[in-house]
């Protein structure tokens, strides 16, 4: 059987590779679209494929509280449910338990919480997270980790990081060999430890000792400076094995992804391109656009000249702005399609630069372009 | 030049024909999808075409207040604006002036109103309606008519009907020979007169004397009984020339369309299939479904077994219900696609029955099927 991940080329620390799953292969660097409740908001699977989206992420917490993992399993698993034939990744549910659940209490057993829909008390333990992700059937599943509320103390940072390692062992022990749909599931561990290089090193070392399918970096993009993020990423990626994929969770801005690619990260997910679309913000190769701005009202040009996405191929800025001003769903769909296409194109361009040994030049050229503020 | 309308077959009073416009031909009986603000809510043009939608209706009032007819014209007219290459129809704007505008005052000159977005005082006269519809550039344009608020008096009914005829003459006199985009526009008059057969006859006779491209019937589906609607339709269609299309405005329910086809109507529009979709109501060949009903939660079947629409080809009822319960846009899009496909399929079936000389049997079979209430 072919390896899950093949590293094809490096350029400094930057990497180009391929992930192989039972639902097909995907190339890295990779941006994964967030499909929180079993749908990338406002898009059909065909529209996602046309935007070159190859992997969709589902949120375990959202799906466990509605419609319920058992319902998804009964309807054939998350792929069949959402008509997504490509690879999927599910998170552990832990992050949303903290951000959306009420009355949370974390013990060694797991997280007790009241779900935000009907207030029912539930327990999310490592075993329960694996059971749910087994029912959902994603190709990549994430360990449950314990994340301290910020600001935190060095002691609490160390305690939660070490608890996360103990929980990882329970995840490894409880994840069935196959998904409920009979497919292979790859478990990723999550490196924690906040902004403490010592804790990050300890976490990474513990995870690597368990020879996981892949390694995620959690707890970043939570208010630290870009320099702090770079320092921690540098510490962590230096400890991770070359032949396993690295996933920076919840990042992010195009400029942050380029920086992280330069530090050896392979995979990303973020709500930014999709959520921004619903707030009328457009990402382009020449900076950001606020599409509700009146200056677009009579513009016959596309969102981004030269862009090959569905939205840019046919619709004028003037029309798209009208849809947004009128609150029409199609406006949000078109911006979502464009932003996802921009993100996947940025990953493709980064990959091409890495393959050509020109990533440094590419990043130097693109960092200022993509980080230009909205007009 | 080929005629605008060709009557191809009759079966009793029921008719099958073809409309020819500068944007292509369409067959009748015909259901036109309502695209109020320059978009059929939640659907791309490609999704509409796949649902066999052939004509899209735009609302003059909505487009004149936002983004403005001049903006639409600057962006290439309503077809280019909305990327709809097929035929379009625009209404006069009068109906929404009454239902959405405030402080309306109607004089012989036209309707003065405050628009519902910024409260600006505007005048909608026959000339202004034609000017706006000329800028929007629809293939079929509607006269401005004066419609009495209900309940009304016989005197007011007669006055407004006769004013509508005078306004029709001003529409005829002021509509330019071509749209702002250089295409042919066909003007339809609107038969008014409420539930008074004498007034309806007078209105129809006046309109026919003006040899219009087509004839609409207005002021029905406003609370009258089905028997009253049938009686009025029978009076009106008997007076209209066979070689011109007849359009029953704002109707409606599948059973009402079948009845109207049996009385010689060719064209329909209604928000029902699209608005119902946004309220989770599905039309099928076996009655209506309320898709938020819990009994659909674990159903792996499609919305309608045997249906060939995009939604039914791939998505389970369980998934669609989940999308609706979660407030996800895709749920509304899928129901809209299905309902429009159902409506256009019903028109196709009616046409086939007319061509086969079996419309009576078809209507008798389908009326009870499509009028079954929601489960």
Image (cartoon, coloured by chain):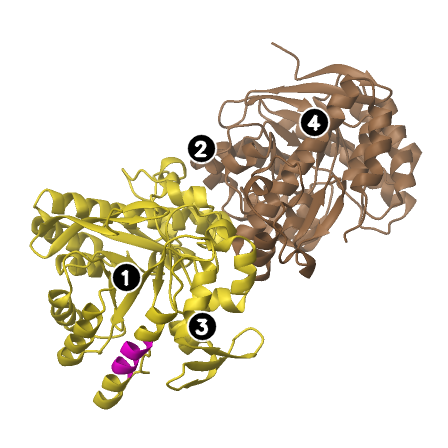
Chain colours: A brown, B yellow
Q: Is residue B164 magenta?
A: yes
Q: Which residues are magenta?
A: B160-167
* Closer to us: A190 or A31: A31
Q: Is residue B144 magenta?
A: no
Instruction: Identify whether B337 is placed above or below A177.
Output: below
Tag 4 secondary structure: helix
Q: Would you say the residues marked 1 and 4 are in contact, meaning their CB atoms lie under 8 Å apart?
A: no
Local packing at callout 2 (Cα closer than 10 Å; few below 14, some 14-19, many 20+) is: some
Mark in the foreground, 1 or 2 = 1
A112 vs B213, left or right, is right
Q: Which residue is mark 2?
A: A76
Q: Which residue is mark 1?
A: B252
* Closer to us: A145 or A266: A266
Res A348 label? 4
Q: Position of residue B155 (x, y in %)?
A: 23, 90
Q: Residue at 92% x, 40% y: name it.
A: A227
**What is the quadrant of residue A343 in the picture?**
top right
Q: Which residue is mark 3?
A: B128
Q: Position of residue B53 (x, y in %)?
A: 35, 47
Q: Which quarter of the image is occupied by the N terminus of chain A?
A: top right
Mark in the foreground, 3 or 4 = 3
A165 vs A275, left or right, is right
Residue located farthest toward the top when viewing the structure as drawn: A1
């Amino acid at each position: 059987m072919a390896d899950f991940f093949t590293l094809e080329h490096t350029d400094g620390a930057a990497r180009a590779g391929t992930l192989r799953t039972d639902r097909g292969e995907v190339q890295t660097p990779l941006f994964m679209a967030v499909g929180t409740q079993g749908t990338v908001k406002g898009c059909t699977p065909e529209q996602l494929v046309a935007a070159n989206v190859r992997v969709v992420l589902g949120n375990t917490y959202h799906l466990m509280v509605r419609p319920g993992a058992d319902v998804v399993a009964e309807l054939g698993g998350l792929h069949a449910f959402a008509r997504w034939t490509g690879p999927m990744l599910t998170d552990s549910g832990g992050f949303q338990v903290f951000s959306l659940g009420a009355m949370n209490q974390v013990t060694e057993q797991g997280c007790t919480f009241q779900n935000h829909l009907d207030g029912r008390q539930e327990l999310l333990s490592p075993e329960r997270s694996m059971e749910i992700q087994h029912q959902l059937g994603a190709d990549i599943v994430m360990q449950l980790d314990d994340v301290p509320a910020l600001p935190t103390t060095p002691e609490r940072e160390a305690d939660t990081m070490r608890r996360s390692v103990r929980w990882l062992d329970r995840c490894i022990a409880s994840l069935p060999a196959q998904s409920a749909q009979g497919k292979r599931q790859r478990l990723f561990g999550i490196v924690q430890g906040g902004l403490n290089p010592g804790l990050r090193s300890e976490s990474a070392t513990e995870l690597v000792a368990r020879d996981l399918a892949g390694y995620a970096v959690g707890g970043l993009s939570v208010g630290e400076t870009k320099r702090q993020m770079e320092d921690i990423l540098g510490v962590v990626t230096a400890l991770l094995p070359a032949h396993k994929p690295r996933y920076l969770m919840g990042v992010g801005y195009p400029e942050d992804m380029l920086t992280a690619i330069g530090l050896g990260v392979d995979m990303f997910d973020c709500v930014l391109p999709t959520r921004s679309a619903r707030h009328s913000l457009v990402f382009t190769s020449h900076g950001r656009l606020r599409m509700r701005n009146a200056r677009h009202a009579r513009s016959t040009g596309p969102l981004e000249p030269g862009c090959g996405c569905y939205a840019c191929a046919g619709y004028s800025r003037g029309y798209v702005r009208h849809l947004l001003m009128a609150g029409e769903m199609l406006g949000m769909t078109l911006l979502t399609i464009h932003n996802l296409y921009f993100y996947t194109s940025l990953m493709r361009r980064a990959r091409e630069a890495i393959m050509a040994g020109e990533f440094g030049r590419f990043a130097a050229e693109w960092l200022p372009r993509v980080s230009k503020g909205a007009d």
